[in-house]
Image (cartoon, coloured by chain):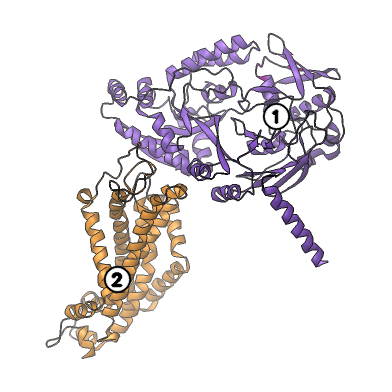
Chain colours: A orange, B purple
Amino acid sequence: MSDAAVIASPGVRSPLREFWRRLRRRKVALGSAGVLLLLVLSAVFAPWVAPYDPTAADYLNILSPPSAAHWAGTDAFGRDILSRIIWGGRISLAVGFLSVSIGGVVGIALGLIAGFYGRWLDSLIMRSSDVMLAFPGILLAIGVIAILGPGIDNVIYAVAVFSVPVFARLVRGSTLALKNAPYVDAARAIGVKNRWLMLRHILPGTLPSVIVYFSMRVGTSILTAAALSFIGLGAQPPSPEWGAMLADGRSFIGVASHVTFYPGMAIFVTVLAFNLLGDGLRDALDPKLKNV
Amino acid sequence: MRHMTLALAATALATALSFGGAEAKTLVVGVADNLTTLDPANANDTLSGGAARTMLQGLYGFDSKMQLEPLLATSYETNAEATEFTFHLRKGVKFHDGTDFNAEAVKINIDRVRDTKVPTKRQSLVSMVDRVEVIDDYTVKVVTKEPFGAMVNNLAHAGLFMISPAAIAKYGKDIDRNPVGTGPFMFKKWSGDLFETVKNPNYWREGYPKVDGVTFKSVPENGSRIAMLQAGEAGFVYPLPSELAPVVSANQKLEVVKVPSIIIRYVAMNTMKKPFDDPRVREALNYAVDKNAFCKVVYGGFCKPAEGPVPELLKYSGVVQKGGWPYDPAKAKALLKEAGYPNGFETEMFAKNNSTYIRAMQFLQQQFAQVGVKLTVTPLEAGVEAQRIWSVAEPKDATVQTQYGGWSASTGDIDWALRPLFYGKGFPPKLFNVAYYKSEATDSGIEAGIATGDSAKRQSEYDAVQKQIWKDAPWIFLTVDDFLVGQAKGLTGAFAAPDGGLNFEKAEFK
């Protein structure tokens, strides 16, 4: 019965329904998911949602505090901060999802190969991962930017690079456990090819841990991308990327704190939401925590 | 023993605190950087020159409007060719070590700075000097190799402050840590971020100095420097970033002093490269930028539109166009169309990577976009900037299309505001003509202007040069900065000159 949640078999609830049944009870995670959905929707529909053009300057109205016309005030160029945050959400969310997706796909592939074939391939991939894990993530990203040059595209690659080893290690672990599972042995016995075995029978089993890690990693990536933009390596002016907005506004923190407060809040809320969602997903997906 | 140390410390603290109050007698100055040396002949930075100015003085100095003011000389004469300058020296002045100040001392000092065997960083100020003649004890004549009309200005620069000949002989190279001059304050101590002086009781100017000493504290962080002022720890803070000015103004005990400067802000356009080889394009971009808005957005309103290629406070400068180059985007578009760019074009701008410069470039990007010009902004770290702009050996290899920058002519003479930036023989790496601008009329005017000591003649040459440059528009002429100083209310006589040079000779708490 306990394994039945992972592999669907007749007579029990499907894994998806089981997952939903558990997630439903985690209100914080659901709330976070709601917040994120709102963020994604506002980013997707930015041209309709944002009250102003994010690059339109109004020199008669610079650094004005929040008001009815500008809910989050205006920045040093008189641009509407709320509109910039909404448009910036496109960049930050895209960077977060894209970088982790790229890192995830590469990492999963490497982890599967390492775990499934073992021996020297395993050693090679895992030792390389260890080397990369030895660097703090942001340092590795700065190194990648130093090679590729500043720019938001390169931030995506940089963050992807330091996501790879963690995914690889995660998937390798699950693969090692699953490859000797009876159903895999059975599949092999009836002559299923290696590639099919990996993709159809092992990969789905690794997904719960990957999904949890993915959601948390998106938060971290958004934070890293913002940090890189803040120090001038990421998004270039006049991009409304959140980290770049913080950097733009920091000299005004004494006289117009709203210029840094709102972009800072946007980063904070988004990253927190991804982490809380990740926590909730872990609880919902972990088969050991059944029926709690 | 320990108790005694503690008691001493407590006394010192109490003294220090009482100095912070209204009856303060020592003026504490908060500055942004550490001093590099106390030998102004070897200082590259204006700040170190300002610190030296508390103790040392030149034949002439600059007042708060950057006008020449007699200090150790009382007057001078020059011949018509501007090759001989005779100075009459102030009598009865003694250096802090008791040595007499006289013509011999002047000769020793000028010869020290122009000595090619032991080069000083400020040698270029007197490199045109052929010889210094002692006429009598209080008369000295400086003879130049070629006509040089700006000689007195050069001698008024911090690099030519007079140091006691006895001290030069005694300390040699270590004079940078043992300055002995004729100034209102005497050297006490310099270590790291702290520099202290005490009152010179025998100062030649009757009734001065009015404070017991001047202390410099280097505090790089803007916020901390302002906090010192707010806490009464410092009486004078320079520079005050424009975005923090409202914080200081809001405090009843403090005031913000605005100093019109000789720092001009501009965008140099590479006149050898398309599309900037067409004067219509350069004019168009001048019309495309709203200078008043630039001031407001980039410098918090503390600057004003440039009314000529040279800041107004420099001698021989003139207003070419009242109110600056007009803002007229419609005309800009028309000019671009006429030049064959009806849909604008794409270009790139280089500048230093500090936050003010980046803000300036972003502003220009927005303004250019209004007339269809798409600007890519490239902030450069100082080393990269030097490599990409200032070390390019051949004009054809230059990659710079436009550059945003600023210039301060610290000799207070117009020659140093024109020659480095607009002279046809001054392309990088020699000088700083990054617009690669070359005009026969301008070049001959710059040459003729320096070749005479006759004020009227210099004026007419420089008037023509400035009009010519404005007409050729190798730059987008933006603004002239105002500096901001934060100080305690009741402090008078302390000022930052338009080039950023600090002066505390007549400082007084009222």
Let me know if residue B193 appears in the view: no
**Along the viewing direction, whichever of A35 and A43 lies nearer the viewer:** A35
Above/below status of B17 relative to B274: below
Chain for disc number 2:
A
Label 2 and label 1: CA atoms lie apart by: 68 Å
Which numbered disc covers residue B408?
Answer: none
Position of A105 relative to A1 (above/below): above
Quarter of the image that includes the C terminus of chain B: top right
- Highlighted range, magenta: B141-150
Q: Secondary structure at mark 2?
A: helix
- Which residue is label 1 attached to? B123
Does residue B259 appear left or right of residue A148 in this picture?
right
Q: Chain of mark 1?
A: B
Residue A277 is marked as: 2
Q: Is residue B373 above or below residue B218?
A: above
Quarter assignment of residue A16:
bottom left
Query: In the rendered picture of this protein, how many numbered marks are placed on residues?
Result: 2
**Horizontal and vertical percent position of residue B91:** 83, 22
Is A259 above or below relative to B273? below
> In the image, residue B455 lies at what x, y percent?
62, 12
Q: Residues within 10 Å of mark 1 (few under 14, many from 20)?
A: many
The lab-note entry on whether marks 2 and 1 share a chain reads no
User: Mark 2 is on which residue type?
Assistant: Leu
Q: Quadrant of the N terminus of chain B?
A: bottom right
- Residue B138 point in image, percent of width and height: 83, 19
Residue B89 lies left or right of residue B35; in this view the side is: right
Q: Is B143 colored magenta in this rendering?
A: yes
Q: Which residue occupies the foreground of this view, A138 or B457?
A: B457
Task: Tell me which amino acid carries mark 1.
Answer: Gln
Residue at 32% x, 60% y is A96
Residue A36 coordinates in the image, percent (x, y) = 26, 63
